[in-house]
Amino acid sequence: MPTLRSTTIGLQGRYLLSARDQHLVADATPSRGGPGQAWLAAELLLAALATCAQAVIESSAREQAVVLRCVRVHGEAEADEARPGHYAFVRLDFELEGATQEEARALVGVYLNICPIYGSVSRGAPVTVNIRGLA
């Protein structure tokens, strides 16, 4: 089961994220008081979608004997001004070098069916929140 720990580090709007023995610096946007220089939350979401896509597509291509030269995923998201706390859209564009259009559709289809990150974002997933104040 994946786990993550995110900690403030004493600089307003800068956070240290740790998973296993790996570390990543992330920032809040300037509108939230952060420096906006390191990875932003929306970029991390898009990165998770793209990374899962590339992993599933590459492994599926190997299983189907499709020789891919490169898999590119371009992602973008825009906040929904009318519904705070929601995105108006999340868009993923795929380029699969070495695959026919039919093979590319099939490989991306596998991703759409089995990636838990895509499934959670596109269809929603229950989220549990636990809160503990430590005054």
Image (spheres, rainbow, N blue to C red):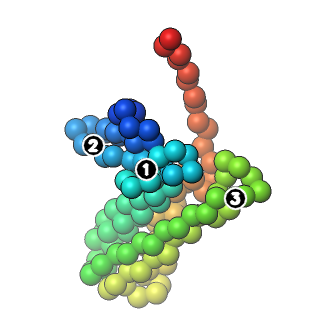
Q: Which residue is disc 2 drawn over?
A: 23
| Residue 114 as seen in the image, left or right of residue 58 | right
Instruction: Name the amino acid type tagged 2.
Output: His
Residue 110 placed where, x, y %?
46, 66
Question: Along the line of sight, which residue is nearer the eye, 98 or 28?
Answer: 28
Mark 3 or 1: in front is 1
Q: Is residue 29 above or below residue 7?
A: below
Question: Between 40 and 74, which is closer to the camera in this rendering?
Answer: 40
Query: In 3D space, how far apart are the residues under numbered discs 2 and 3 (Cα atoms)?
Result: 30 Å
Badge 3 marks a residue whose secondary structure is loop
Give the crowd class for mark 1: few <14, some 14-19, many >=20 residues within 10 Å: some
Earlier sequence position, callout 1 versus callout 2: 2
Structural distance between the alpha carbons of marks 1 and 2: 18 Å
Q: Amino acid at mark 3?
A: Asp
Task: Indicate which disc residue 80 carries.
Answer: 3
**What x and y, as percent, mark residue 97?**
34, 84
Above or below residue 104? Residue 33 is above
Q: Residues within 10 Å of mark 3 (few under 14, many from 20)?
A: few
Please give left or right for residue 123 compared with residue 98 in the image.
right
Measure the C-alpha gap from mark 3 to mark 1. 23 Å
In the displayed structure image, the side of residue 87 where residue 40 appears, left or right: left
The amino acid type found where label 1 is placed reads Pro
Can residue 114 be seen here?
A: no
x and y, in percent, of residue 100 in the image: 41, 88
Q: Which residue is mark 1?
A: 35
